[in-house]
Image (cartoon, rainbow, N blue to C red):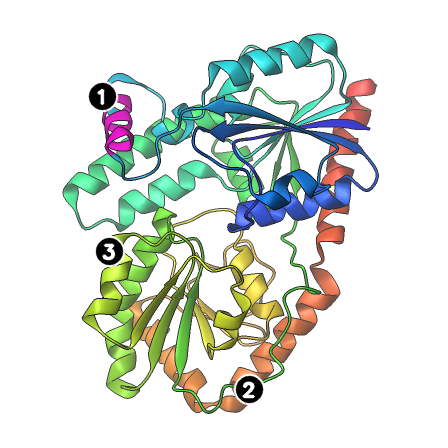
Amino acid sequence: MRILWVKTGPLHPIDTGGKRRTHAMLTEISREHEVTYLSLLPDGTVLDDKEADDDYAAHKIWISTRIAPKWTFQFWFDLIRSTIFSSKPYALEKYEVLPMRKKLQEMSATGGFDLVICDFLAPALNFVGLRFSAPAVLFQHNIESQIWKRLALSQTSVLKSWYFRIQYLRMKKWEAKLSALFDGVITVSSEDSEIARAEYGLTNVLGHVPTGVDVATFRPSVQGNSDRPFTIGFLGSMDWRPNVDACLYFVREILPRVWEMLPQSRLKIIGRNPPSSLHNLASIDARIEVTGTVDDVQPYVHQCHVIAVPLMAGGGTRIKIYEAMAMGVPVVSTTIGAEGLAVTHGEDILLADGSADFSAALVKLEGDPELSSKLAVKAREQMELCHSWAAATRCFMKLCMLRLSSTST
């Protein structure tokens, strides 16, 4: 098949869960199909050397655009302008780009594709009013409104809560409207599919694709770390608001409880582009390390005795949990943090909500090497048996083919 895949940025460096999922699945899809990758390229972005040589797509088309980097003056100006004068959520509006829309319009007129994929909701505003001869499918890595709703509920600041609530209500309205435009919607968890059907009344939800992990790349360490102080890791993109809030909550509410029992324990925050609020943590206490952007997270994760996922907001599925499991490191997560994942409390993960229970689970792992080893071994086995990217991609293409066959009849 000839497949058009639409996204909002290059895939390299592969430093987020969303990029990892897209890259892995496109690599699998491109083994059998001809993929054209159409994406925005923000001004000032220099394509990674690996981007051109990577065969995740046969053709790559870049649409230059101006998107202000986070926390710059222009970013704040655009955000305030959007909040006051627009009915659209800023997280979507900033990706509504006229040259992208014109290119999609041109491609829809030629009819040169058998399948069109809108990857994430972010590019979807550019599809409004267009009609492709081929089925167009929205690939929803998250139910975006759920993220904004949980962010609003988790804020202690009245101003932040007000802002996030506005964005939540706008996102809910536009997510429902845009999702209904497509011939099909594919999510990444059964929970997300149910939300799309129940809250948005969508009748075009095709199903969900399980999260995968590259078990050949992410592997347990051959060296132990028993000679190191008990180290808790936090793994994820540190420029994503739910991760930042979770880190700050962990340091404020959970870590002091751990230190009461284990005063020599360490916290290692692993992930790209941490804001100053996280960098400042390391200057406050030497037991906290903020790695910033790293070429390979594995050496840092292997130094940890446990990965903590204290998320209070979020959506979709959390690839970082499966990657930690594949690396043979036990995971302690909130229920929200592991939502949508095929995990079992006490077997391959520990689930704990609330600062007291979460800290108790971490302390328990430090004092029970047998439990720690059991969780790590079982988790690795599960990743090897059930969660390859090839299996996830087969599921995705099967759902797309169902849409294709129903359209043709």
Nearest to the observer: residue 400 or residue 352: 400
Q: What stretch is highlighted in magenta?
A: 73-82
Residue 360 location, quadrant: bottom left
Image location (x, y in percent) of residue 228: 42, 87
Q: How far apart are marks 2 and 3 (CA)?
A: 32 Å
> Which residue matches tag 2?
224
Mark 2 Cα shell of 10 Å, populated few (<14), some (14-19), many (≥20)? few
- For the stretch drawn in magenta, what is the main secondary structure? helix
Check disc 1 and report the residue beneath it.
Answer: 84
Magenta segment: does it hold 74? yes
Q: Mark 3 points at which residue?
A: 277
Secondary-structure class at tag 1: helix
N-terminal-most mark, 2 or 3? 2
Q: Which residue is drawn at 72% across and 58% down?
A: 388
Earlier-in-chain disc, 2 versus 1: 1
**Gap between marks 3 and 1, in whole Å?**
27 Å
In the image, 367 versus 196, the foreground residue is 367
Secondary structure at badge 2 equals loop
**Residue at the (62%, 41%) spot, across then down:** 51
Q: In the rendered structure, which disc, 3 or 1, sits on the residue that comes first in sequence?
A: 1
